[in-house]
């Protein structure tokens, strides 16, 4: 069956309009929420009895291309922050704060009219700040140290639409389960100098050991898409 030039032009115009509307619909997204990260590693036991810590999550991203079979592709940048504390040996108080930044690549497919599922991979860095304090000594100084570790994650989740998907701004509830793999954070104790006339030698530092924060993580939050 032959098609007239008018029919061909009409199909091309319809395709262009469809691509344009797809490019504009929910192109960008911002999410805010919280979650929990689990700490199964024995390296954490010397700092705290806690098996998990709460996190605050913030993410910004955008939709890229639609890939046949796979679905829509997205990229994003995620930051999360949390802390864990405890007491060891009956007197040593410890505080470990963790901040993680990851670049995410995500593939999304619709599951139902108002539900979509996704799978994602992430790569980034984690920064850890450890503080140790002897609660039984008024004169002892707190020991502090920073370190960074490579971070990666693999996860899957659901977005549940909460508003009209035809509007210019849409809101969804996002739940996600992931596994986060981190290289160990290495901490050292370095004595503080009392005055400017004292020379601090690297040989005076002591190894505090390593902390591995790898484990399962759960997150839930609200996503604004526009």
Image (spheres, grey):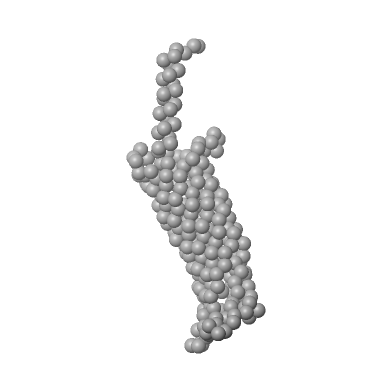
Asked if residue 221 is positioned above or below residue 13 in the image, the reply reads below
Q: Position of residue 101 (x, y in %)?
A: 51, 57
Which residue is outermost to the front? 197
The residue depicted at 55 percent of the width and 56 percent of the height is 124
Pick the residue in front: 68 or 189. Answer: 189
The residue depicted at 37 percent of the width and 40 percent of the height is 165
Q: Position of residue 95 (x, y in %)?
A: 51, 73
Q: Position of residue 21 (x, y in %)?
A: 40, 33
Is residue 147 something that shows in the picture? yes
Residue 132 horizontal side relative to residue 57, left or right: right
Residue 40 horizontal side relative to residue 24, left or right: right
The residue depicted at 43 percent of the width and 19 percent of the height is 9
Is residue 109 something that shows in the picture? no
Pick the residue in front: 213 or 45. Answer: 213
Quadrant, the C terminus: top left
State the image quarter where residue 211 is shown. Answer: bottom right
């Amino acid at each position: 069956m032959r098609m007239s030039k008018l029919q061909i032009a009409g199909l091309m115009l319809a395709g262009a309009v469809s691509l344009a509307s797809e490019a504009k619909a929910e192109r960008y997204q911002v999410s805010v929420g919280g979650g929990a990260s689990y700490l199964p590693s024995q390296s954490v036991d010397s700092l705290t009895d806690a098996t998990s810590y709460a996190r605050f999550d913030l993410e910004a991203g955008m939709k890229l291309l639609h890939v046949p079979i796979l679905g829509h592709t997205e990229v994003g940048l995620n930051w999360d922050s949390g802390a864990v504390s405890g007491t060891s040996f009956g007197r040593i108080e410890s505080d470990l704060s963790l901040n993680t930044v990851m670049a995410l690549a995500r593939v999304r497919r619709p599951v139902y009219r108002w539900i979509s599922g996704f799978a994602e991979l992430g790569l980034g860095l984690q920064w850890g700040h450890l503080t140790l304090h002897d609660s039984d000594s008024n004169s002892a100084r707190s020991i502090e140290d920073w370190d960074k570790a490579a971070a990666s994650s693999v996860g899957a989740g659901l977005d549940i639409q909460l508003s009209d998907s035809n509007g210019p701004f849409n809101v969804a509830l996002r739940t996600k389960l992931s596994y986060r793999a981190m290289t160990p954070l290495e901490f050292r104790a370095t004595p503080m100098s009392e005055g400017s006339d004292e020379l601090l030698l690297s040989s005076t530092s002591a190894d505090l050991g390593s902390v591995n924060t790898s484990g399962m993580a759960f997150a839930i939050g609200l996503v604004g898409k526009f």
